[in-house]
Amino acid sequence: MSDLPHSLRLYRQESLAPGPRLLVLGAVHGNETCGTRAIERAIRSFERGERDLLRGSVTFVPVTNPLAYRRGTRIGDRNLNRNLRPKEITADFEDRVGNVLCRLLGEHDVLLDLHSFTAPAVPFVMVGGTDPQSIEWRFARTLGPQRFVTGWMEVYEAGVARRRREGKQLDDPGLLDAGYGVGTTEYMRSRGGYGVTLECGQHDDPEAIEVATRAIDNALDFLGLSDRRKRAKVEAAEAETVVATAPAAEVLRLTEVVDREHAADSFVGEWSSFSPVTAGRVVARRHDGREIRAASAGCILFPSRLAMPGHEWFYFARRES
């Protein structure tokens, strides 16, 4: 018998009153476990009677990719958070999980997908659309972190179009498929719901678990699902401090994806996500000496020194507020 996992563990709380249906995911990438730990806390709070559900439903998936989680790696066979769509023919473990995950996403109205990242940085929310008054943006602003990144699909699709124009011959055909950029939130939107990805902090930072925990609490409250009366006095006492210390929101829009062309392509300097750049700053150099410069002032996002030739290497973003 195969040693591959055969199921996903779900926890669902259903209210007797109708209302929004929230889905909370942890460990879509197996080495990103802060969401798993925060979800386990939330489940215990329901089981102990510390929290009740006023309306609607909430479904928790502590470990969305059990193969990657078992291995302690980002992926099992491939990245579950790419090319997410139902597959009649499943080619790998993530395809099988994806079929279940797509069904779950279609059964819910709202998604909170909890992630973490490698290098130390401030937590941030990946959000879609351009309307700051949309329900998705209002949901995102309630979760806690006040740094927001948008423009993922637009930049991803532009990168695919560029590779096609250039006639790139790539080992991964997904890099020539705009649909390959679709992950949990994009699929959720395609089914009529809304959702965000919350990057809670560095993988091993205990504070990332606290960020994820607060986000779950805030999501339940925003949707009017949660009954937290047993903690009302404590939270009322904390409210003034939270308001007084809340940072100003920062919105960054992705503007360009830069691919690695050759194994000898290299960064010029030490870059991490949100490192600021000025217009014209040399960021990297191709193996033949060509310079890659920032077209405008902004920052670097998601730089990967381990990127393979032909794959995404880093992104440029500009600050909108």
Image (cartoon, rainbow, N blue to C red):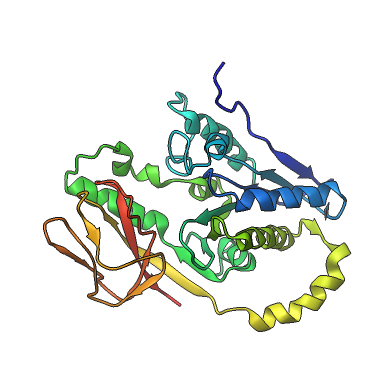
Q: Please say if 27 is above or below 120.
A: above
* Residue 248 image point, x, y percent: 55, 79
* Residue 66 image point, x, y percent: 58, 36
- 120 lies left or right of 45: left
Question: Residue 123, can we see it?
Answer: yes
Tell me how many marks there are.
Answer: 0
Residue farthest toward the bottom in the current orientation of the protein: 244
* Residue 281 image point, x, y percent: 24, 74
Residue shown at 81% from the left, 75% from the top: 236
Q: In which quarter of the image is residue 108?
A: top right
The front one of 183 and 234 is 234
Residue farthest toward the left in the current orientation of the protein: 288
Q: Quadrant of the N terminus?
A: top right
Question: Residue 131, can we see it?
Answer: no
Residue shown at 46% from the left, 61% from the top: 119
The front one of 187 and 32 is 32
* Residue 141 image point, x, y percent: 60, 68
Residue shown at 54% from the left, 65% from the top: 123
- 247 lies left or right of 282: right
Q: Please say if 107 is above or below 216.
A: above
- 76 lies left or right of 60: left
